[in-house]
Amino acid sequence: MPDSLRTCFSETKINGLALRNRLIKAATFEGKTPGGLPSEALIRFHERIGQGGIGMTTIAYCAAEADGRMHENMMFMHEGIRPELERLVRTVQVTGAKVSGQLGHCGSFTKSRELSRKRPLGPSKGTNPLGLGYGLGRVEAMTKPQIREHVRVFGQAAAFMKSVGFDAIEIHFGHGYGISQFISPKTNKRKDEYGGGLENRMRFALEVLGEVRRVVGDDYPLLGKISMTDGVPGGVTYDDSVRIAAMLEAGGIDVIICSGGTSSMNPMLLFRGDSLAPGLIAHESSRLMKIGIRLAAPFMFRSYPYEETYFLEQAQRIRDRVQCGVCYIGGVCTNDSIRRVMDAGFDFIQLGRALIFDPDFPKHAQARANYENGCSHCNQCATLIEAPGGIYCVERPANFE
Ligand SMILES: Cc1cc2nc3c(=O)[nH]c(=O)nc-3n(C[C@H](O)[C@H](O)[C@H](O)COP(=O)(O)O)c2cc1C
């Protein structure tokens, strides 16, 4: 086995947490939390991923509060789901995998019928495309006390997650969700110290990181997922992201995960491959939204053909800039790609679709030097996040049964 593959399959640590290898399951919201409750299917899904040999899995979309959910079938961190979450975490840990939770907030990007206020909150007034068909199309700007409250809520959720047994927390700084709405000049038009230059636009992100770090302590693993670019004119650029990474490092993050794009403006940049639009239209329940997606599709779902390790060149700039851990994400489906990423100096690799296609990816890749996963990047899985029962691989529907 070449050295770079051996490195990938050797034990390592994140801030004291031992992982059996450097492969981490990426957060892929599985749509298996009906009514906000972690289901048996979710437990089974991650247990199966653990059995496949992953170093650590990530439970997607652990919302910091009820209003941090895009819709009511997402879970938020509160005592009411402690027994189910504890069982989920323990069941996966028995397989030898560690468990991380992706802590996030949708900000203004919501269509939740259970939203506690009339309008969703964001850094600035604006439009919420996701809420248009649900009477939640207008966004209200957060006051400073509301910003302080959001920071507090992130800390409270992190404390809860640690107490439940999560081995690590991944803070979601990217993809157009709440924190990245502050980072992006496209959505942050504030005139106070939370808006303007990048230092100001990063203030909320760094306050959240500082509060989460304060609450969980110095010796607890914290990862952060960023968008290296929003992929739209006037948004975050690849150049910005090198500075964003340096600021997060200075703020105490242990590992930076280098993603890109936004769910709200340019989702195909982060996925590549076949457009999500037809599947999303098919599974959308609101007729108004179906029409909206169809009309927006040519601008929103742009064509980006799939290629292996599509973020490597840009992520390399971050790898070269920071000393903390850096995790590569985006299009790793073969051992050749693992080698390339490891040779480039990355500490970890996150895998999304390839594990949905083959949950035994780590075992197979370790056993066969020329392993090729076979996921076609049809992206049907990603269009099923709100379908009854949630996601599965349409080419291998029995994977998680
Ligand atoms: C079904 C599905 C759901 C996803 N949900 C999330 C999510 O909840 N949070 C997130 O940060 N990224 C999410 N993503 C994006 C992945 O984490 C990852 O960035 C993307 O799939 C690229 O990695 P890959 O080429 O290994 O699949 C999702 C992807 C898929 C396929």
Image: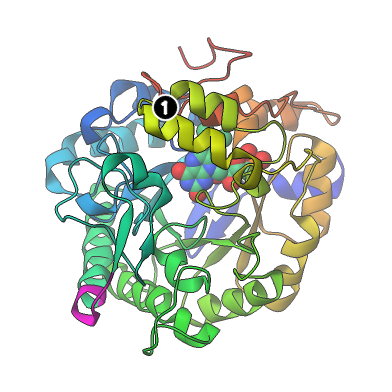
x and y percentages locating residue 268 in the rendered image: 65, 44
Q: CB of residue at label 1: within 8 Å of ligand 1?
A: no
Residue 68 visible in image: yes
x and y percentages locating residue 281 in the rendered image: 50, 27
x and y percentages locating residue 90 in the rendered image: 32, 36
In percent of the image, x 61 and y 66: which residue is there? 325
Q: Inspect the magenta stretch and tell me whether residue 145 lies in it.
A: yes
Q: Residues within 10 Å of mark 1 (few under 14, many from 20)?
A: some
Task: Give the answer, above or below, for where 354 lies relative to 196.
Answer: above
Front-lying residue, 298 or 317? 298
Task: Give the answer, above or below, for where 329 lies relative to 94.
Answer: below
User: From the viewer's perspective, is 373 left or right of 204?
Assistant: right
The magenta stretch is 141-147
Q: Quadrant of the C terminus?
A: top left
Indicate the amino acid at tag 1. Glu
Front-lying residue, 167 or 68? 68
In percent of the image, x 36 and y 72: which residue is there? 124
Front-lying residue, 391 or 5? 391
Q: Inspect the magenta stretch and tell me whether residue 90 lies in it.
A: no
Q: Quadrant of the N terminus?
A: top right
User: Within the displayed image, which quadrant is ligand 1 positioned in?
Assistant: top right
Residue marked by disc 1:
284
x and y percentages locating residue 42 in the rendered image: 36, 27
Task: Give the answer, above or below, for where 376 lies relative to 10.
Answer: above
In percent of the image, x 73 and y 32: which residue is there? 366
Total numbered labels: 1
User: From the viewer's perspective, is 376 left or right of 146?
Assistant: right
In percent of the image, x 77 and y 47: which residue is there? 309
* Color encoding of the figure: rainbow
Residue 106's image quarter? bottom left
Front-lying residue, 391 or 320? 391
